[in-house]
Image: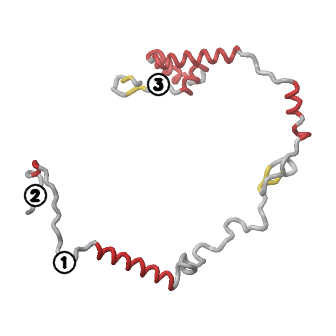
């Protein structure tokens, strides 16, 4: 999908937007020259350019779409016949037709809360403080100790771990008996 250029760097294909801009003549002169040179060398991009030219010609020769008179009448009657919803909460329309945000008076403004650092620290009140927290921590520590005791051997001797050593490892690894 890529060709190697003179320095051994891969050359990428033109992006679809670049092909459209090339066919429509919207590229700068330098970009147009580079795209033109690429299209002459690359069969894939030449086909994409040809396809875009065919699509452009088909759109230019197509007639404009038309709508029926009854559809246009119904669309024109929408502002007069349809119930429009009320304005969303917190928005209003000024006399000159501009949307504006309205501050609610039942809620404090953003930033009107207590100063950062003036409230009580997290965990200083509620369920995670006091006697319950100390009891819970004691249960957790006891469980950890019991599980550690369960994994140790009863006679206190440690069993040596057997690690398989590769056959050709004599020169690289030192083995202990």
Residue underneath mark 1: 155
Q: CA distance from mark 2 to mark 1?
A: 31 Å
Dot label at residue 56: none
Q: Is residue 75 left or right of residue 18?
A: right
* First of labels 2, 3 by sequence position: 3
Q: CA distance from mark 2 to mark 3?
A: 56 Å
Report x, y in % for residue 74.
87, 32
Whether 133 is drawn above or below 151: the answer is below
Q: Mark 2 touching mark 3, by CB under 8 A?
A: no
Q: Nearer the viewer, residue 174 or 161?
A: 161
Q: Mark 2 touching mark 1, by CB under 8 A?
A: no
Q: Nearer the viewer, residue 51 or 147?
A: 147
Q: Nearer the viewer, residue 63 or 125?
A: 125
Dot label at residue 13: 3
Q: Residue at x 87, y 50 (%)?
A: 95
Report x, y in % for residue 5.
37, 23
Report x, y in % for residue 166.
13, 50
Q: Is residue 142 left or right of residue 85?
A: left
* First of labels 1, 3 by sequence position: 3
Q: Nearer the viewer, mark 1 or mark 3?
A: 1
The secondary structure type at the circle numbered 1 is: loop
Dot label at residue 174: 2
The secondary structure type at the circle numbered 3 is: loop
Farthest residue toward the front?
Answer: 154
Around disc 2, counting alpha carbons within 10 Å, would you say few (fewer than 14), some (14 to 19), or many (20 or more)? few
- In which quadrant will I find the N terminus? top left
Around disc 3, counting alpha carbons within 10 Å, would you say few (fewer than 14), some (14 to 19), or many (20 or more)? some
The secondary structure type at the circle numbered 2 is: loop
Whether 64 is drawn above or below 75: the answer is above
Farthest residue toward the right?
Answer: 80
Q: Residue at x 57, y 24 (%)?
A: 27
Q: Residue at x 29, y 74 (%)?
A: 150
């Amino acid at each position: 999908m890529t060709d190697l250029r003179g320095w051994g760097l891969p050359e990428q294909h033109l992006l679809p937007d670049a092909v459209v801009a090339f066919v429509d003549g919207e590229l700068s002169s330098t970009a147009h020259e580079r795209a033109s040179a690429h299209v002459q060398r690359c069969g894939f991009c030449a086909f994409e350019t040809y396809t875009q030219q065919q699509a452009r010609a088909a759109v230019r020769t197509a007639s404009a779409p038309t709508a029926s008179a009854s559809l246009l009448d119904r669309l024109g009657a929408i502002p007069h016949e349809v119930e429009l919803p009320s304005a969303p909460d917190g928005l209003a329309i000024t006399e000159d037709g501009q949307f504006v945000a309205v501050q609610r008076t039942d809620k404090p403004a953003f930033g009107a809360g207590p100063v950062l650092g003036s409230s009580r620290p997290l965990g200083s009140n509620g369920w995670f403080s006091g006697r319950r927290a100390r009891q819970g921590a004691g249960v957790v520590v006891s469980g950890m100790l019991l599980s550690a005791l369960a994994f140790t051997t009863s006679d206190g001797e440690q069993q040596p771990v057997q690690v398989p050593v590769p056959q050709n490892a004599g020169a690289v690894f030192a083995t202990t008996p």
